[in-house]
Amino acid sequence: MLFNSIEFAIFLPLVFVLYWFVFNRDRKAQNAMLLLASYVFYGWWDWRFLSLIVFSSLVDYLVGIGLSKTDHTQKRKLLLLISILVNLGFLGFFKYFNFFAENFAQAFTLLGNTFRVGSLNIILPVGISFYTFQTLSYSIDVYKRKLEPTKDMVAFFAFVSFFPQLVAGPIERATNLLPQFYKDRDFEYHKAVDGMRQILWGLFKKIVIADNCAEYANLIFNNSSDYSGSTLLLGAIYFTFQIYGDFSGYSDIAIGTSRLFGFNLMQNFAFPYFSRDIAEFWRRWHISLSTWFRDYLYIPLGGSKGGTWMKVRNTFIIFVVSGFWHGANWTFVVWGLLNAIYFLPLLLLKQNRNNLSAVAEGRVLPSIKELISMATTFLLTVFAWIFFRAESISHAFKYISGIFSWSLFTIPRNIIGHSGAYILIIVVVFVLFEWVGREQQFGLQKLGLTWNPCIRVMIYYGIILLIIFGGGNQEQFIYFQF
Amino acid sequence: MIRTFISKSILVAFGFTLLLITNWFIFTMGAGLPGPMVSNSISLNYKTYFAEEKDLKHPDVIAIGSSMTLNNLHSEVVINNLKTESYLNYSAWGIRPSQILSLLKILMQKYTPSLVIIVTNIADYQRGGPVINESTFSDYLADKHSRLYNYLFAYTPRSFFLDSRRTHKLRKIKNSYESLAFDPFGGVSLKKKGFLINEKRWGGNSLKLMSPDSINYNSIKNIAELCKHHESQLVLIQSPFREGFLLGQDSVDLKTFNQHIEMISKIAEDFQIPFINATNSIWQDSLFVDASHFSKLGAQKFSEYIFRELHVSYPKLFQNGKSWVADSL
């Protein structure tokens, strides 16, 4: 079920009413109801893959119970290994089997041998990368004794499959989300209103920004050999806003929806395109994944405690793994590598923790220096997104060589019609909204709260009208494929 | 607090719904809903709506195809000659034989016509045409989904509004190619008076630019099989071009055209389908609104020609003075 579908528009109020009016007397009943709703939400796409979530949840639940009953180090390690193997096994099979098989065969061919590996017609279960990491975090935290293993099966299953963030995050840590299932939840009016505003803003980002930009980004990337350097650059910028609107829009809807049910999810995006360097960008982009890799990969590898070589090695590992997490294609690996290369100078010069607060904090406008830093970081990310979006490495290189040609200094043609100009205007207005709200959790959070309620409602209506009439063709959320 | 939240949410939603309805009313002047979205063709969608409204349980005769069938087949001539009013013209713009096949497979589940008429010309055999959502179309025709369900789940609000407005506009005009002003049987006669003749369309595309695709010839064969299976009589008609257009074509262009005619004739012969090739006669420019679309008068003369030829070449179709007999050939 998509957030931007009529099915969800019916599903959400229905679940909300049942949750607060029918099952409100008993927390366990509420949890059971959320679990059922989550399975309906997921099964709407393909009910067969529900078995994967149930199995994954069951394994980690039993591993948790097992860990609680033993202090024997070897047994504990074995239990953790079972959890890791089952979860990463599913992920590896569904997401990476064909990739490895094809590359294995190609490597043999390069060595002069013929090796045929049949590829399987595997459907990638939606959200597998997200819920796998979420449930893994539970096993690892219990193993490290950071978290008490749960005996409440329903609460644990509901934690793994919690519908607002099941298919595209934020990837919640068990230490944050699971305890919320143990507590009684009271309806908080202001929290719910704030949630509604965040849902509205998320829908705007997805339908108006991302879907509109997608039309042009797809057109330009799919026919890149036909366009001038300036148009190709514009195409990369369109994609930059598409992926941000798409993914952060989803996160906003997920967080807002959770708030309607009394849950708090972690912030997943903190205005990343206003970052002053690439390290700040990675503290603000897909925060739940970055911190997951930091906590469960970078730190266990030694983090930055070792010498320079170890820091560099660990940095490259997490960026490459992060790239590979996104998809079984070399383009994602190169995208990760490129970001590691961007990050390296900051790490070596110990400048990677320079910009911890929001840009131009307490001020309306940034300084010239901040503006230049933001523009540079933005262009670096635009460049990296080309690899992320391209069909193949060669496509990405052709695209980039197309940009760096004399035609870069021409006016983009055949693209900027009436609707192209409309999208650019909408993007500029959107960036202004985001700038104004950059010290909040999301762009619309505080805007107009002190204004006359009638004006505020008119603003909401304006945004809803734009969502309905100014949106692009409905596109699947990009991150569903990951 | 939760009741306040819900009542305020309902109030905002109600206000917005009111705004939407007002907008819709202003957009469409309160008249007209689009057809159920069974394809990306507003014409086919609206034809589906029309057929549903007409509520013919079992039409004896179905004409189906592109604008060649929609505009060039004169409904009154058809019903007068076939002596039945149980007739439905299920044509829509740009429908190719491959799409006719898809539609007929589904339509035959609901309707059991004894006669199926398809009027085409060479341009209909090119690749392309509208995209039909077969499962939606099938579910809709089988009454699995209501029109309201279709409006809610197949349309986005934006496409619903835009299609409402466009359908409403096209239902009123009769002097445009894009007219959806159906006669009582689903046909559209193009009024010559006041018709804005499009110079490009009057000139028509060169015949050599029309490259027929084998998929459409195969579809005609499959349609023949399908009709035979359902005991329906199929009749194929080749619609002509205006005289001036054909005179402007060189011999190379005409070669493609003749090959096409041979292909259709061969299929008709193999499957024993009555086939009328109207390009054997000369059709004056004054009967057309462009290279291949007849005006109302042209459509009438063309349709009369079809039935004259059918009477002469396939007299068994019209036995006992009452329409035709399906298995009489």
Image (cartoon, coloured by chain):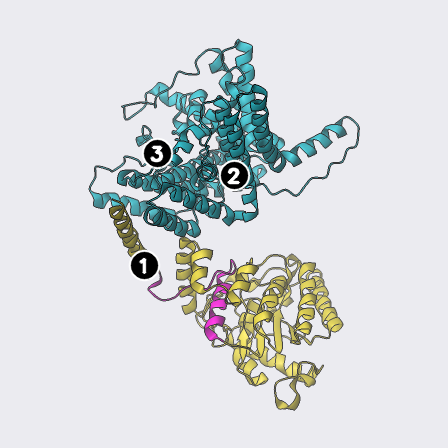
Chain colours: A cyan, B yellow
* Letter of the chain that mark 2 sits on in the rendering: A
Q: Nearer the viewer, residue B206 or B313?
A: B313
Is residue B46 located in the magenta-colored stretch of the structure? yes
Screen quadrant of the C terminus of chain B: bottom right
Q: Which residue is mark 3?
A: A442
The mark lying in front, picked from 3 and 1, is 3
Specify the farthest residue to the right. Answer: A113
Q: Is residue A84 left or right of residue A469?
A: right
Specify the farthest residue to the left. Answer: A452
Q: Position of residue B243 (x, y in %)?
A: 61, 71
Identity, as a three-letter code, of the amino acid under mark 2: Gly
Q: Which residue is mark 1?
A: B21
Screen quadrant of the N terminus of chain B: top left
**Mark 1 residue crowding within 10 angstroms, few (<14) / some (14–19) / many (20+):** few
Vertical side of B210 occupied by A13: above or below:
above
**What SS does tag 3 mark?**
loop
**What SS does tag 1 mark?**
helix
Q: Residue at x 56, y 75 (%)?
A: B73
Total number of numbered discs in the rendering: 3
What are the residue bounds of the magenta stretch?
B28-55
Identity, as a three-letter code, of the amino acid under mark 3: Phe
